[in-house]
Amino acid sequence: MRRAITALTRRELLRIARNPQAIITSLLLPILYLVLFGQAFNLSRLVPSGAEGQAYLASALLGAPSYFSYFSAGMAGFVAVTATLFLGANVIFDRLFGVLKRTMATPATPTEIFTSRLLAGSVQPIGLAFLVLGLAVLLGKLGLSGLDVTASVTVVGAAEIVAAVVILSMMFASLFLAIGFSIEQPQTYFAVVNAINLPVLLTSAALYPWGILPSWLQTVAAYNPITLAVEVIRENLFAGATAYYTYDPAVYLLGLLGWALAMFLVAILLARRALAPRH
């Protein structure tokens, strides 16, 4: 089983590496968000100056030193999800061009085929998420609004951030892959994933300042997997942020892991059903 997964994963990674145009295109969205939207929206100008205004801003941003810092941490979770959208579409196109049929004709089992695509497909979203954090820090060094890490990130904190990004990327990658295996038409696939992706993104605290959300949306966002992942990142990056959160990062990470296990189960059931031999 290990040899089949390794071989299929290597093949998928080679396909990604041989398509630099797709890699460059996937980089444009997070760069545009950071350079344009993140720089243009300065929340500090919307609140009164002085201690009262700063206290309100700190509460609205959950202890983040600026909206850009709050936003860039959220963008890491944002791109970890959006970069997985095309994984299922690739499966559909492989089916149309006969690639999937040839793969299924090999001794590899449906579980091995699904796992290899999941492992290879998760590399790019995970890399993009950390690229966003690095680029956000770099923008600050260039004199623009940047990610200001005000906490001393420990080894445990860094591990929690990595785990949050990896789990978030892989859980949505598995779901969108399973949908891709289950649907035969690209138009239907994009309609389905957008019906999932947009509500999940827009009901999270990835981009919106938490303190200005209506109470009902705060309740919904608190259980959103993207919010859980982003909360782990923010608590570890910003000093004093723990005062604005109900739980420690490890608790949010456990909640995210619960979401991931449930989503993995759904994805595996969908993929096995779609890849089962048809008589």
Image: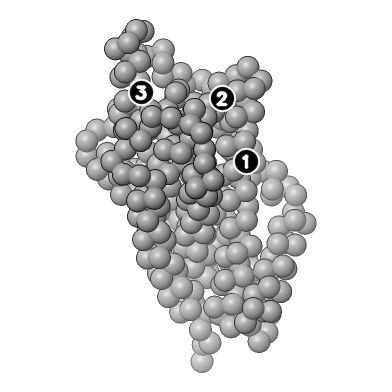
Tags 1 and 3 touching, CB below 8 Å: no
Residue type at mark 2: give it.
Gly
Of the 4 image quadrants, the one containing the N terminus is: bottom right
Task: Please name whichever residue, 69 or 220, is drawn nearer the observer in this view of the structure.
Answer: 69
Between the C-alphas of marks 2 and 3, the distance is 17 Å
Viewer-nearest of discs 1 and 3: 3
Picture quadrant where residue 96 is located: bottom right
Between the C-alphas of marks 1 and 2, the distance is 14 Å
Q: Which label was assigned to residue 58? A: 3
Q: Residues within 10 Å of mark 1 (few under 14, many from 20)?
A: some
Residue type at mark 3: give it.
Ala
Q: Which label was assigned to residue 131? A: 1
Residue linked to disc 2: 146
Check the image and report above or below for 58 versus 251: above
Q: Secondary structure at mark 2?
A: loop
Tags 2 and 3 touching, CB below 8 Å: no
Which one is earlier in the sequence, the residue at label 1 or at label 2? 1
Between the C-alphas of marks 1 and 3, the distance is 26 Å
Scheme by which the image is coloured: one colour
The x and y percentages for residue 17 are 75, 56
The x and y percentages for residue 222 are 30, 44
Tags 1 and 2 touching, CB below 8 Å: no
Which residue is at a point 55% across and 32% down the rendered structure image? 33
Which residue is at a point 57% across and 44% down the rendered structure image? 129
Q: Which label was assigned to residue 251? A: none
Q: Secondary structure at mark 1?
A: helix
